[in-house]
Image: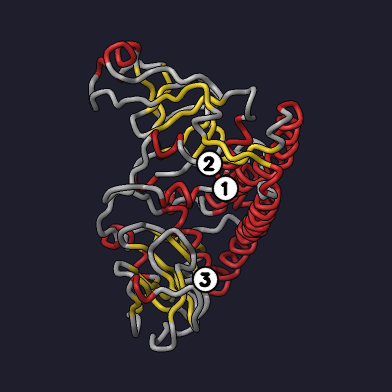
């Protein structure tokens, strides 16, 4: 069924007026603002800023909150859009607090999500956002208009509520995973031998960055080339960037065999880990360990270094907190039943089987809860577009 047909059947084929956002909302000035150093883990009022997190922290009683009401929040720099219906303290500059007055607040929120076109650039975007056209059905019949808006909100909220439930479930499973990982990777000293990551590795690999913008090194490339921002505590099945054979021949980039434990070594990403499920190349900020299968299960090593992310990160040196291959290969790992290799590998495999189950549930984009959340978000976006695709005024006139 077409979008217009859907609306005609379920919403009576409502006519629509396209109204700029700033005619439907009033901009609210907050009574106080919290700076980053004012953010607390607990406090009287939640802090809402333009970041991706819905609640960024909490403020103490010295900050006067924005009064409890229904608001649409727009990040002037980040372009994040939120709906808030409670008292809060504004955090960080660049936040636009919008009080809907020309329509149902959550309808305006859903419509802004649907029609605002993000740029992805860090600049002030309110001047463009306020011109976003919001479709208002039956503009000459306020009662009918609000009834249609409420029905659209009811349908769309059913999708967002399901996504929220799945997200809460994911958070709970991540906590459960961390609990079992801590238990399974905690040993009595007489049960293990502490070795280094270098001890249990056959070989380590690094990489290089072919000259940026070089047609010779990138155009038409088919060789996967991994950057540290893609190392995110999960299996790696592909890369965003590909390089050419010339890049492989003429730079320090080299093939890394599948199933290596890859640890990022540069500043902001230092300590993050992953496993490459395909042969690939990397930039110079990755340390790739090919694990000796006679000594350790590579997935056991991965779970250990993932659990110890903060410890690895704290080893960083210099202003950027960089790691290096020497520091990583010197990092200690407990090997159970060191005097019985067969029993040791069997115990590692048992631990891996349990942790992989949780890992799939909490991180897999093909099987786990993240995939289910992604599908529900796509379903919400599809129906949001469908429900807000009213017949255009000029089409009605024709």
In which quarter of the view is residue 23 placed?
Answer: bottom left
Residue 398, x across and y down, in percent: 44, 47
- Looking at the image, residue 293 lies above or below residue 303: above
Q: Cα distance, mark 2 to mark 3? A: 58 Å
Structural crowding at the residue carrying mark 2, measured as other residues with C-alpha within 10 Å and reported as few (<14), some (14–19) or many (≥20): some
**In contact (CB < 8 Å): disc 3 and disc 1:** no
**Element carrying mark 2:** strand
Residue at 48% x, 32% y is 262
Q: What residue is shown with label 2?
A: 332
**Element carrying mark 3:** loop
Which of the two discs, 3 and 1, labels the residue nearer the N terminus? 3
Q: What residue is shown with label 3?
A: 104
Q: What residue is shown with label 1?
A: 307
Task: Please give left or right for residue 371 compared with residue 222 in the image.
Answer: right
Q: Nearer the viewer, residue 292 or 286?
A: 292
Task: Please give left or right for residue 255 compared with residue 33 in the image.
Answer: right
Residue 326, x across and y down, in percent: 39, 35
Structural crowding at the residue carrying mark 3, measured as other residues with C-alpha within 10 Å and reported as few (<14), some (14–19) or many (≥20): some
Q: Nearer the viewer, residue 40 or 316?
A: 316
Q: Nearer the viewer, residue 297 or 274?
A: 297
**Element carrying mark 1:** helix
Which of the two discs, 2 and 3, labels the residue nearer the N terminus? 3
Q: Cα distance, mark 2 to mark 1? A: 13 Å
Query: In the drawing, what numbered circle is on residue 157?
Result: none
Q: Nearer the viewer, residue 242 or 87?
A: 242
Residue at 71% x, 27% y is 341
Task: Please give left or right for residue 366 compared with residue 243 in the image.
Answer: right
Q: How many marks?
A: 3
Residue 325, x across and y down, in percent: 39, 33
Residue 164, x across and y down, in percent: 62, 59
Which of the two marks, 3 or 1, is nearer to us in this view?
A: 1
Residue at 53% x, 26% y is 201
């Amino acid at each position: 069924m077409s979008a217009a047909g859907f609306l005609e059947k379920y919403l009576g084929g409502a006519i629509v007026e396209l109204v700029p956002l700033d005619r439907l909302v009033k901009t609210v000035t907050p009574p106080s603002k919290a700076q980053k150093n004012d953010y607390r883990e607990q406090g009287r009022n939640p802090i809402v800023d333009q970041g991706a997190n819905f609640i960024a922290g909490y403020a103490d009683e010295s900050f006067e909150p924005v009064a409890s009401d229904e608001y649409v929040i727009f990040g002037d720099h980040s372009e994040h859009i939120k709906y808030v219906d409670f008292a809060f303290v504004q955090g960080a500059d660049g936040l636009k607090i919008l009080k809907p007055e020309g329509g149902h607040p959550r309808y305006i929120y859903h419509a802004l999500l649907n029609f605002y076109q993000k740029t992805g650039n860090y600049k002030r975007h309110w001047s463009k956002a306020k011109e976003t056209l919001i479709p208002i059905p039956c503009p000459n019949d306020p009662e009918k208009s609000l009834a249609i808006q409420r029905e659209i909100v009811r349908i769309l909220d059913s999708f967002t509520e399901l996504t929220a439930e799945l997200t809460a479930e994911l958070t709970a499973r991540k906590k459960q995973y961390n609990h079992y990982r801590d238990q399974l990777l905690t040993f009595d000293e007489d049960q293990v031998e502490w070795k280094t990551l270098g001890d249990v590795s056959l070989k380590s690999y690094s990489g290089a960055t072919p000259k940026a913008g070089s047609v010779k090194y990138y155009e038409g490339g088919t060789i996967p080339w991994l950057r540290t921002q893609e190392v995110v505590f999960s299996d790696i099945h592909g890369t965003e960037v590909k390089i050419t054979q010339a890049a492989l021949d003429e730079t320090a980039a080299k093939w890394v065999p599948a199933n290596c434990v890859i640890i990022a070594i540069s500043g902001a990403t230092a300590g993050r880990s992953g496993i490459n499920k395909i042969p690939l190349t990397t930039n110079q900020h990755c340390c790739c360990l090919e694990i000796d299968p006679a000594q350790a299960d590579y997935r056991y090593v991965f779970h250990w270094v993932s659990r110890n992310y903060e410890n690895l990160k704290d080893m960083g040196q210099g202003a950027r907190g960089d790691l290096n291959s020497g520091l990583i290969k010197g990092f200690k790992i407990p090997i159970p039943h060191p005097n019985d290799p067969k029993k040791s590998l069997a115990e590692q495999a048992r631990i891996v089987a349990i942790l992989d189950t949780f890992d799939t549930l909490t991180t897999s984009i093909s099987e786990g809860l993240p995939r289910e959340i992604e599908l529900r978000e796509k379903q919400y976006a599809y129906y949001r577009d469908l429900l807000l695709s009213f017949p255009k005024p000029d089409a009605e006139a024709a």
